Image (cartoon, grey):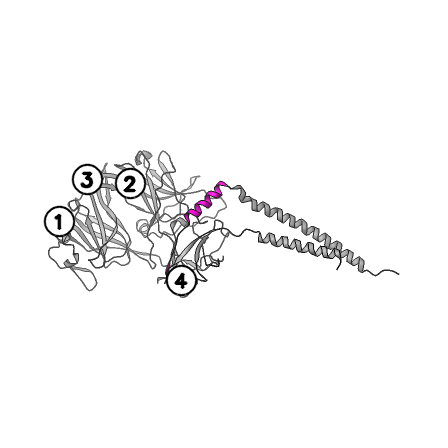
């Protein structure tokens, strides 16, 4: 082999090594992971996501989420409620029983009742007065014939009842063991400024129980109940408890409205308005604002409300208003109040929304915004976390992973690790039956994410260095390939010249 050929082959090897080094120098896809703790043997596990995931994932629908095993491979998963049967809501009046003070003091409510064959209550003890008694320190509510979980209780009071009636609710399955349902609540019927304010419904937060017990905070300030209606919902899959954001103060206020910046990507299902000044009452129109989208962006279809209370109270969502600025979607009209009464403060109730994603909420007053008080109110928004089911394929530990730059235009099920249909993930899946899966939990790395965001904000320029280096490397490789081609051609021509037959 000639020296020239040897040198040429060495150059080829060097350039190939440079190309391989360039390929290895390509940055791996970046993302954030959080460890998943498994409960049970599986193989399927149910994982409820923290609400904080919305602000970190790249898309509001969380399409960039992946579940990975110890080898870093994406494992199959599906969203739990995407294909489950839609919730079925129902309303019915239920039996109530007044418990006089003496009976309430005895502490054992079960002694006064027996159970019928269908499980409902039958009154046995004479000291207990039926509904309508004038010495009712407690009220027993029989919800044994209500199917599903309890959404809210609607109370009817005597027509002449006026005031603020504070109480606590408890739940039981046997009339002996009682557990609290939320904190102190209020029934309100007031006349203020020529308006009548009523709050006679209380959310029950999807509790499951056979019996409820209402106990007045002050029996002397209790009301006579004439009836109770229960709204319930039947869902195939269990619903995770509602979670609330921290207090959100207005981002800006104008003459007749205040705008509130919402947590990024969060589907708003409940709204609480906390008025700062006491003895405040105002009529409000609440609307959702979305940031103006690029003209090339495809219009997103309106969400299907999954909040059963919203479905009960608002059958149709009002159309979106386009006014040249942010898209404004009217949600509801209401009256908010915070009033001082003899039994305490009367506050407006939590509002049920449709679960859509909005960039901001706008609270518009019927008059100057000062009707909300000298200090604009703060708000808090609530949502039910999403739940997924994954197959524990491969070795543990498993981790939840997400990226700020997922695959563009990804179709569900087409990208490795993208969510599947439940019927694909679980052979024999039926939408009318609950999924059998063990539990799992995840904790988001708050400190690590905060540090990463801070570093990215403080030093944005170095992030461009890899692309610059990549350009120089590709340029050098291109020049080298041209030189290599020239040398190969020169060598080939020389070999042909040396091998040609000589004339004698």
Where is mark 3, residue-wise? 342
Say whether marks 4 and 2 touch (CB < 8 Å): no
User: Would you say 435 lies left or right of 103 here?
Assistant: right
Nearer the observer, 66 or 186? 66
Discs 2/1, front = 1
Residue with the most extreme front position: 3
Residue 36 visible (yes or no): yes
The reply to whether dot 4 and dot 3 touch (C-beta < 8 Å) is no
When asked about the image quadrant of residue 248, the answer is: top left
Residue at (65, 48) in percent of width and height: 476
Q: Which residues are magenta?
A: 435-458
Q: Are marks 2 and 3 in contact (CB under 8 Å)?
A: no
> Which one is in front in this view, the residue at disc 2 or the one at disc 3?
3
Residue behind mark 1? 135
Residue named by callout 2: 336
Disc 2 and disc 1: Cα gap in Å? 32 Å
Foreground mark, 4 or 3, reads: 4
Residue drawn at (23%, 53%) of the image: 170
Disc 4 designates what residue?
A: 44
Q: Are marks 1 and 4 in contact (CB under 8 Å)?
A: no
Q: Residue at x 28, y 45 (%)?
A: 349
Q: Quick one: SS at disc 2?
A: strand
What's the distance in space between the residues labelled 2 and 3, CA to CA?
A: 19 Å
Q: CA distance from mark 3 to mark 1?
A: 20 Å
Evaluate whether residue 80 shows in this view: no
Mark 1 or mark 4: name the one nearer the start of the chain.
Answer: 4
Q: Residues within 10 Å of mark 2 (few under 14, many from 20)?
A: many
* Up/down of 255 relative to 498, above or below: above
């Amino acid at each position: 082999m000639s020296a020239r050929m040897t040198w040429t082959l060495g150059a080829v090897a060097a350039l190939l090594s440079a190309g391989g080094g360039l390929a290895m120098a390509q940055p791996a896809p970046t993302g954030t992971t959080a460890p998943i703790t498994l409960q049970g043997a599986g193989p399927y596990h149910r994982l409820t996501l923290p609400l904080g995931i919305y602000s970190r994932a790249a898309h509001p629908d969380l399409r960039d989420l992946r579940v990975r095993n110890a080898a870093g491979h994406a494992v199959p998963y599906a969203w739990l409620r995407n294909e489950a049967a839609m919730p079925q809501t129902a309303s019915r009046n239920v039996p109530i029983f007044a418990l006089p003070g003496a009976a309430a003091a005895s502490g054992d409510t079960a002694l006064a009742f027996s159970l019928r064959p269908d499980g409902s209550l039958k009154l046995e003890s004479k000291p207990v007065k039926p509904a309508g008694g004038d010495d009712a320190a407690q009220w027993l509510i029989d919800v044994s014939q209500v199917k599903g979980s309890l959404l809210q209780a609607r109370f009817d009071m005597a027509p002449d009842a006026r005031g603020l009636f504070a109480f606590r609710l408890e739940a039981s399955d046997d009339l002996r063991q009682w557990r609290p349902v939320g904190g102190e609540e209020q029934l309100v019927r007031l006349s203020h400024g020529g308006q009548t304010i009523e709050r006679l419904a209380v959310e029950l937060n999807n509790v499951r129980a056979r019996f409820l017990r209402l106990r007045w905070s002050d029996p002397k300030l209790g009301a006579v109940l004439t009836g109770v209606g229960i709204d319930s919902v039947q869902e195939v899959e269990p619903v995770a408890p509602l979670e609330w954001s921290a207090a959100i103060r207005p981002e800006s206020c104008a003459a007749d409205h205040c705008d509130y910046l919402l947590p990024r990507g969060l589907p708003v299902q409940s709204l609480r308005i906390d008025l700062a000044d006491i003895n405040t009452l105002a009529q409000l129109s609440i609307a959702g604002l979305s940031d103006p989208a690029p003209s090339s962006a495809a219009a997103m279809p309106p969400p299907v409300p999954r909040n059963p209370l919203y479905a009960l109270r608002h059958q149709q969502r009002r159309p979106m208003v386009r006014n040249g600025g942010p898209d404004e979607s009217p949600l509801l009209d209401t009256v908010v109040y915070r009033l001082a009464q003899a039994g305490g403060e009367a506050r407006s109730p939590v509002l049920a929304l449709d679960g859509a994603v909005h960039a901001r909420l706008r609270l518009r007053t019927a008059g100057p915004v000062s009707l909300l008080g000298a200090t604009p109110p703060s708000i808090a928004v609530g949502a039910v976390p999403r739940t997924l089911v994954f197959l524990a394929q491969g070795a543990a530990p498993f981790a939840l992973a997400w990226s700020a730059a997922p695959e563009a235009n990804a179709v569900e099920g087409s990208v490795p690790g993208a969510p599947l249909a439940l019927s694909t993930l679980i052979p024999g899946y039926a939408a009318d039956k609950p999924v059998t899966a063990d539990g799992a939990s995840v904790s988001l790395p708050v400190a690590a994410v905060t540090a990463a965001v801070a570093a990215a904000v403080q030093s944005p320029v170095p992030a461009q260095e890899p692309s610059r280096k990549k350009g120089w490397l590709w340029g050098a490789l291109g020049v080298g390939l041209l030189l290599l081609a020239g040398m190969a051609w020169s060598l080939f021509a020389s070999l042909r010249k040396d091998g040609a037959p000589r004339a004698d």
